[in-house]
Image: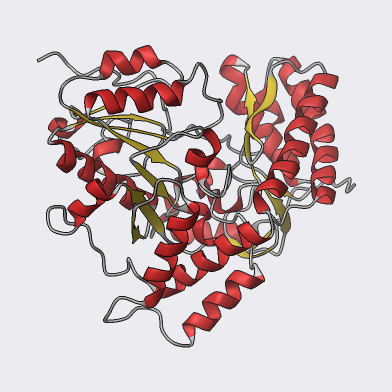
């Protein structure tokens, strides 16, 4: 166990940040990776490299990483089998003037492993996939309104109902509404005759209760509503076949990205042929880079590694160790205001301390940096995380939670923070825009 009283030196990170401030709005391409999600003035800002479950910043500091690229790195940084597949494909080309054979090969693989898949299409980002699915649902049903639960990307149809919706016409906002997870009554209250689709993350951190997912399936069948599973997080983590396999629930479409290719950009739309066939003539969804071959090669290699090495069970085992370990430490310290919740493959540390919650999270993140741990509130587990690293992390948690508890009991936790606290993000997923307006 490292007993290090020093926070990392981040001089080069800060110099780059000063340049970025006048060049890149928000200084990041991904909000969850940006400076607002880390303690400014203490945490690293820019990465240099990664290997396994370790990330190195531009100042040469190395950390055990529990963010893992915000999801894509299911196997770990610089994973040999995937990198070899990318390198081999690179020798013969990246993007071509004809569809590449990998488009067929990977589509066949996806159909084999994802339940209820009749057709497959590829694109580049999760937002591409969710937006294509929404368009298909509208075309298939002839209806307009969308009910959603979770986070579904940056496109107009979804972001219109968040607090970052400037630039989106009110007419679009009035076509999307949210419902509360595990609250089937909120679904029934929101459905009307113009509801085209229900799209949701099948799980985030709360388990479905009272046959919630089955009830969604049944009401969608009854009312000719397309049920869409946004499996950006559950895909290839909760089971090889995703949430449909794990829960035994059939969606009309299931959408994947993040873990598909261990860091390469790809998204996958799967679904029933009677819906997906609308892409032949009626619904336009094409992109120059949809069939980019390096990402397809990485996808094929990643999925085969997940299957061949039983990655699902491994990350479940490692994830259980760190989640239960955190909860045991918090319980031993009498810290009834913090706990880790969620499934083992992806758990979240929660602080239930009213106005102090975000401050306490910031303090814990800050203190973990002294032990070489990069943490943003989550345990995004990869195949590269080892039991030894988890034990080390739990020792660090024990040391750092003592400081957090001291800060909490002081009544002035802000005095324990060395930099700027983490800022809240817009990812509010319940209790807003919940019911369509009466006509």
* In the rendered image, the vertical position of residue 35 relative to residue 355, given as above or below: below
On the picture, is 25 further left or further right than 70?
A: left
**Residue 148 placed where, x, y %?**
33, 30
Q: How many discs appear?
A: 0
Of 7 and 180, nearer the camera is 180
Of 302 and 265, nearer the camera is 302
For the C terminus, the image quarter is top left
On the picture, is 175 further left or further right than 318?
A: left
Residue under the point 58% across and 34% down = 421
Of 36 and 291, nearer the camera is 291
Residue under the point 76% across and 26% down = 327
Residue under the point 74% across and 23% down = 407
**Residue 394 placed where, x, y %?**
81, 38
Q: Quadrant of residue 321?
A: top right
* In the rendered image, the vertical position of residue 230 relative to residue 290, given as above or below: above
On the picture, is 264 further left or further right than 136?
A: right
Residue 234 in view of the camera:
no
């Amino acid at each position: 166990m490292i007993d290090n009283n020093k926070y990392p030196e981040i001089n080069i990170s800060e110099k780059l940040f000063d340049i970025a401030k006048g060049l890149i709005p928000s200084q990041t391409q991904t909000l969850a990776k940006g400076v607002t999600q880390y303690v400014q003035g203490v945490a690293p800002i820019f990465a240099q490299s990664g290997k396994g479950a370790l990330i190195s910043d531009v100042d040469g500091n190395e950390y055990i990483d529990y963010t893992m690229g915000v999801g894509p790195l299911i196997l770990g940084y610089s994973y040999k089998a995937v990198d070899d597949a990318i390198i081999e494909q690179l020798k013969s080309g990246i993007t071509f003037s004809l569809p590449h054979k990998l488009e067929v090969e990977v589509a066949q693989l996806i159909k084999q492993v994802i339940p209820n898949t009749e057709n497959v299409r590829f694109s580049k980002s999760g937002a591409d996939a969710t937006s294509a699915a929404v368009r298909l649902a509208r075309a298939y049903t002839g209806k307009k309104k969308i009910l959603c639960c979770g986070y579904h990307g940056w496109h107009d149809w979804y972001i219109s109902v968040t607090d970052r919706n400037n630039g989106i016409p009110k007419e679009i906002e009035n076509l999307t509404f949210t419902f509360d997870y595990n609250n089937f009554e909120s679904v029934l209250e929101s459905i009307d005759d113009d509801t085209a689709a229900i799209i949701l993350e099948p799980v985030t951190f709360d388990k479905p209760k009272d046959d919630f997912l089955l009830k969604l399936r049944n009401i969608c069948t009854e009312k000719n509503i397309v049920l869409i599973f946004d499996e950006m997080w559950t895909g290839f983590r909760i089971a090889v076949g995703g949430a449909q396999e794990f829960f035994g629930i059939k969606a009309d479409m299931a959408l994947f990205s993040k873990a598909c290719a261990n860091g390469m950009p790809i998204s996958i739309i799967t679904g029933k042929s009677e819906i997906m066939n609308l892409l032949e003539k009626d619904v336009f969804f094409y992109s120059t880079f949809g069939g980019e071959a390096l990402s397809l090669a990485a996808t094929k290699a990643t999925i085969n590694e997940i299957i061949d090495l039983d990655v699902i069970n491994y990350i479940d085992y490692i994830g259980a160790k760190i989640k239960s370990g955190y909860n045991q430490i918090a319980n031993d310290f009498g810290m009834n205001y913090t706990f880790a919740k969620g499934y083992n493959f992806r758990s979240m540390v929660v602080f239930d301390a009213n106005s102090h919650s975000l401050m306490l999270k910031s303090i814990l993140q800050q203190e973990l940096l002294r032990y070489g741990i990069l943490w943003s509130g989550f345990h995004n587990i990869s195949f590269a995380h080892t039991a030894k690293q988890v034990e080390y992390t739990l020792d660090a948690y024990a040391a750092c939670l003592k400081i957090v508890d001291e800060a909490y009991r002081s009544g002035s936790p802000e005095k324990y923070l060395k930099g700027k606290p983490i800022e809240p993000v817009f990812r509010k997923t319940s209790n807003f825009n919940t019911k369509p307006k009466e006509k």
